[in-house]
Image: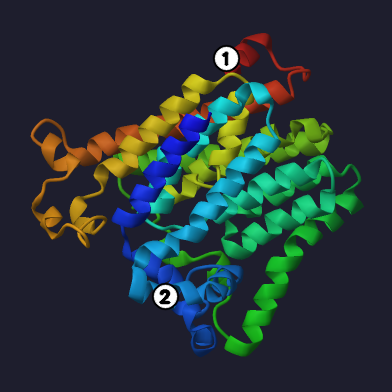
Amino acid sequence: MKKLFILGLLIKILLIFTAFHSDLIYTYEIPSHFFKNLNQLGTYYGPLSYITFALLSPLYFLSAHVGFWILKIPYLLVDISVLYVLLKISKNVIHKKILIFWWLNPIVIFSTYALGQLEIILCLCVVLSIYSAFRNKILSMVFLGVGVAYKSMTLPLLIPSALILEKSPKKRILIMLAGLLIPIFLAALFWFPTRSGITNNYFPTGIIFFPKPELSFSTIWEYLAFGIGVVGFIATQILLFKYKKNTADFINMLFASLGFIIVALPIYSIHRYMVLMPLLILFSLNNKKEKFLALILVTLTLGYIYVWRLQWGLFVHIYPQATNLPALREFVSPIINYENAAFLFKVTADSLILYLAAASLSLTFKKLPIPRNIREKLS
């Protein structure tokens, strides 16, 4: 296990020093001038993102002297924290696999250390919520609410969490309000001084690309994935409402709920899968679905990283000649259109996630009167 940890650490440190993407600066720049830029806080991230990176602004000003690499150090600390909590909430027998599938996860590494995205913080909120669910229900919901205050990706988890952690309708509503308290408070706090479109903090329309009304394989898949995802999410909540489950099913139901939502979202970005990663890993390893997990990671990597060009600036700051080198997609273009290949990889990954989400429902509600042949297909 030590060797795996050291290997992952070396890979991440290497990317911290070599890879760079302008999104890293974008994340830090506005918060670094927090009080001067209050009128711009309704542009993209949640209010807590601005507060957090405002507190980290000394690193931003220091980066001009020592290099942008220093801006990723907080991400590494959060990453290690996620790993620690994952090990705490999992059985010893799968600890080595946790290291492989989280610590060496190409999606986590690429999104966090190559592109400098902040979704790693949401992952910490999710695992802390799981850890707290067995000890303090309110705290578990608060952690999810903290995630919403960063980015709204943890918002769909509030419903299944409330349905599992509490049994009576009144308590479910109260515990859900406890989870919403922080994002609502911060929204109100930012709304009055700025009068900005605070809803855009939680539901940024600028990054959502809706499918075009045309008949193509990609468009058909987007609408199909949206329909299946929404129906799957609603069906999961109905089952939880009708058949009470205990905290032993917490991970399964959070994974199923978020899995359906992630596939349904019309956001063409690898970052949308980040918040699902801890739940996907825990569910897959706890239920001996490692092969499906590995295939999802491989196809997601090929489907999203595969289409990125070196010219996008990941390494150009230390190796300017990178702009003259062909990207992987340019190597294979004489054989296959890279967009078609990437689409195939994405569809495969999303289909596998939907399969595992359905399998989660089958495993959790296996005592329901579901026809045997359907249950066998799901599991």
Residue beneath the point at 77% across and 36% down: 240
- Helix, strand, or loop for circle 2? helix
Displayed quadrant of residue 322:
bottom left
Q: Which residue is mark 1?
A: 377
Q: Decide: is 203 above or below 156.
A: below
In the image: residue 103, left or right of residue 134: left
Residue 115 x, y percent position in the rendering: 37, 55
Mark identifier at residue 62: 2
Quarter of the figure that contains the C terminus: top right
Residue beneath the point at 78% across and 18% down: 367
In the image: residue 270, left or right of residue 321: right
Mark 1: give few (<14), some (14-19) or many (20+) Cα within 10 Å: few
Of the image marks 2 and 1, the number of the one nearer the N terminus: 2
Mark identifier at residue 153: none
Residue 58 x, y percent position in the rendering: 49, 76
Q: Decide: is 289 above or below 56.
A: above
Residue 153 x, y percent position in the rendering: 57, 54
* Closer to us: 347 or 175: 175
In the image: residue 110, left or right of residue 201: left
Residue beneath the point at 67% across and 10% down: 372
Displayed quadrant of residue 199:
bottom right
Q: Marks 2 and 1, Cα distance to the nearest angstrom?
A: 56 Å
Tag 1: amino acid: Lys
Q: Taking the image as drawn, is residue 7 in sight? A: yes
Residue beneath the point at 59% across and 59% down: 152
Q: Taking the image as drawn, is residue 358 in sight? A: no
Q: How many marks?
A: 2
Tag 2: amino acid: Leu
- Helix, strand, or loop for circle 1? helix
- The nearer-to-camera label among 2 and 1 is 2
Cβ atoms under marks 2 and 1 closer than 8 Å:
no
Mark 2: give few (<14), some (14-19) or many (20+) Cα within 10 Å: few
